Amino acid sequence: MTSSSLLPAFLQAVMQGQPRALKDPHYPGWHLAPVTGLMNDPNGFIHFQGEYHLFYQWNPLGCSHQNKSWGHWRSQDLVHWQHAPIALIPGEDYDRSGCYSGSAVDNQGQLTLCYTGNVKFDDGSRTAWQCLAVENAQGGFDKTGPVLALPEGYTGHVRDPKVWRQGETWYMVLGAQDKQKQGKVLLFHSGNLTDWTLAGEIAGSGLGGLGEAGYMWECPDLFHLDGQDVLIACPQGVTKQEKRFLNTYPVTWLCGTLQADGATFHHGPLAELDAGFEFYAPQTALAEDGRRLLIGWMGVPDGEEMLQPTVKNGWIHQMTCPRQLSLKQGRLFQQPVTELQMLRETESGWQGLASQAPEIPAERLEILLTRPPGKSATLHFGNDDLVLTWSDCELCLARRSLENGEWQYRYWDAPATGLQILCDHSSIEIFINQGEGVMSSRYFPAQPATLSFSGEAELQVRYWSLRACM
Ligand code: FRU
């Protein structure tokens, strides 16, 4: 167990905060969320000795981005999760301003966490250490200290180690900012997890034909999928386009080939991973059966997050559902894992003109829709808290700003033939064309939401209400 001086305050915050959070009608029924305080990135996602582990960035003491610690859940099936003891709490010299994001590995049967120790100085500058911690017999984690200091040529913004092993060699990607304020992804290798050598910059601003692509890249994740190498990362400072990269910070993917020497990554164009309002810092893990799984944070830093109404109930943010990744014709697909089907209750169906469709309870809902080309349809969630317009050339998701009530829009800028939509008490995940695109968003309906339809499209609909399991 960690000996941090913050622990008593954390325990008290959980005891006091949890009943309030769980009573909030916006608290998810089947998604992961903090029992109190602020949760952001998923960390340390791994299948280890027969169980999934998911850690998360957590401030139990409030809804601000402070005291970043690692909460910990475990699961047999990706659907039902149990709390495990809090894994990391800041307090050492090398992590005193936060145990920032990272990953988990199986090191000869020992569950080992790789995280960033963040250190902020009074003059506003910072440094970062890449650190390890090892699971102990009580299910807690013992910190073993830093293994990597700031590499030469980079600012204090170097973080979020994603570590994996290939044969006898360990690899690590890190998000970084160079001294010219260009965002980069760095690749390192090691024979023992503790001595690391920089192989090079494998992606980022000014590399691989990307041109200007932001001042900092966070939370990189590099993996082999369906014969290619895929790099997911969160570049900050990418220019907004008319219908893409509209969030404060986007999540992007690159697909290509990592050279055997590890220092060059030949890749295609930068593509957005999720076109919704809230999606950031996703992390992947390999399932026992070889599936590549992904969970993301259904939030975005530095936007309107603190205006979300759950803050007054002492908690904020949730994870996405677990998704399975695949690569088809060079495009990255995401689909909800099949395990989630165990939440389905009785199936219902309907076919006909959208404008004549019955209203459906949408509190916890999975709905599959198809629409032939021609007329459009509009889906109204809640009291028009969220409006999805589906026409031949695009999908447009509209929601009012929490700040000034003005409508804001997000787009899937291509034809959509079929949709799979998953709703929880305050979230929606729209999977487009079997997962070719996804739009993830939070929304906060006043009452348990319903879904109604308008438009002249002929819709075919199958749906299930979903059992709560949190
Ligand atoms: C991404 C991020 C990471 C950092 C963590 C701190 O949301 O900024 O880069 O490690 O959050 O909570």
Image (tube, rainbow, N blue to C red):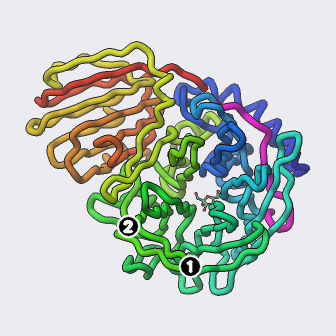
Toward the top, the furthest residue is 346
Residue wearing tag 2: 270
Residue at 37% x, 67% y is 270
Depicted 350 relative to depicted 257: above or below: above
Toward the front, the furthest residue is 167
At numbered mark 2, what does the secondary structure look like: helix, strand or loop?
loop
Would residue 274 be found to the left or right of residue 11 on screen? left
Question: What's under tag 2, amino acid-wise?
Answer: Leu
At numbered mark 1, what does the secondary structure look like: helix, strand or loop?
loop
Question: In the rendering, at what x and y percent does residue 187 appear?
Answer: 60, 73
For the N terminus, the quadrant is: top right
Residue wearing tag 1: 261
Give the extent of the magenta segment: 81-95
Question: In the rendering, at what x and y percent does residue 181 appear?
Answer: 54, 81
Does the closest atom of ligand 1 sit within 8 Å of the Cβ of label 1?
A: no
Question: In the rendering, at what x and y percent does residue 26 appear?
Answer: 52, 30
Contact (Cβ within 8 Å) of mark 1 with mark 2: no
Quadrant in which ligand 1 is drawn: bottom right
Question: What's under tag 1, amino acid-wise?
Answer: Asp
Question: In the rendering, at what x and y percent does residue 153 appear?
Answer: 63, 86
Answer with mark 1 or mark 2, whichever residue precedes in sequence: 1
Determine crowd level at label 1: few under 14, some 14-19, many 20+ residues with C-alpha closer than 10 A: few
Alpha-carbon span between mark 1 and mark 2: 23 Å
Residue at 14% x, 30% y is 455
